[in-house]
Amino acid sequence: MTAAPAASLLPAGGRALDQDRAWLLAQALAPGAADVKVLTLPGPPASKARPRFAKGGATYKDRADAAAEQATAWRLRRNFPQPWSGNLALGVVFFRPDRQRIDADNMVKHICDAGNGIAWDDDAQITATYSVVELDPDDPRTLLVVTRHVSSLDRNPQPLRARRSRRRTVDPSASREAGRSAVDAEWGAAPCSG
C-alpha cells in the first residue's frame, strides 16, 4: 500500500499553473489582501553574490551581480509605476534550469535589493516572505507575488526618515565652528583646544 502524496501549497506543473501558484501564495501570505501584483521574470533566477573586498578592505559589487540586479530592477520598473509603501509580503517561486545548489535566501535577497526604490521604498518594508525553489530546465523563470501585509510591526519608511532628520540639530548654514560647538553642547563634550 502506497501513501498518498502530501498536499502541497504549490501545485506541480508548468507555466500554465503559475497564476494558480500566485493566487495560493498571495492567500498564504496575506489572506484577503486586495492589492496583489504578480510578475513572471523570464530566464534563470539570479542569486545575490557575496560582497567582494578590494585592497584596503573596501567592498564592491561583482559586475555580473550588478548587471543582474539592474536587469531585474528594469523588469520591476515596468510593472511598478510607483514604489509601494507600508508593510509588504513577498512570495517567490524560483524555477531553476539545473540542480545547482543555490540558497533560496540569496535569490530572495537579489529580488529585494533590485526592488529598492522601484517596487518598494526599502526592502525593510517586507515583513513576510515565502520562497520555493523548483526545477524547470525547459522554462527557467521567477514567479513573484507582492501584496500588502498586515503586521503589528509598522515598516513604513516615512517615519524612519523623519526620525533620522531630527537627529541632527545643527543648522547646516551655520559656520563650521558654530556647528562644532553646538554638537559639543548637545553631546556634553568638552571643546577641543588647538
Image: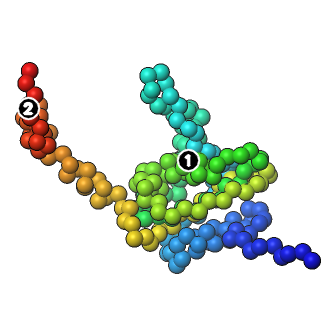
Residue 130 seen anywhere in this rendered image of the structure: yes
Point 47% across, 60% down: residue: 126
Q: Which mark is residue 191?
A: 2
Q: Secondary structure at mark 2?
A: loop
Which quadrant would residue 187 be assigned to in this image? top left
Callout 1: helix, strand or loop?
helix
In the visual, does 90 lie left or right of 18? Answer: left
Q: CA distance from mark 1 to mark 2?
A: 46 Å
Q: Position of residue 168 (x, y in %)?
A: 18, 45
* Rendered view: 17 above or below 78: below
The three-letter amino acid code for the residue at tag 2 is: Pro
Q: Amino acid at mark 1?
A: His
> Quick one: label 2, few (<14), some, or many (20+) residues within 10 Å?
few
Can the viewer see residue 39?
Answer: no
Instruction: Give the residue pinned by disc 1.
Output: 110
The colouring scheme, among rainbow, by chain, secondary structure or one colour, is: rainbow
Q: Position of residue 192 (x, y in %)?
A: 10, 28
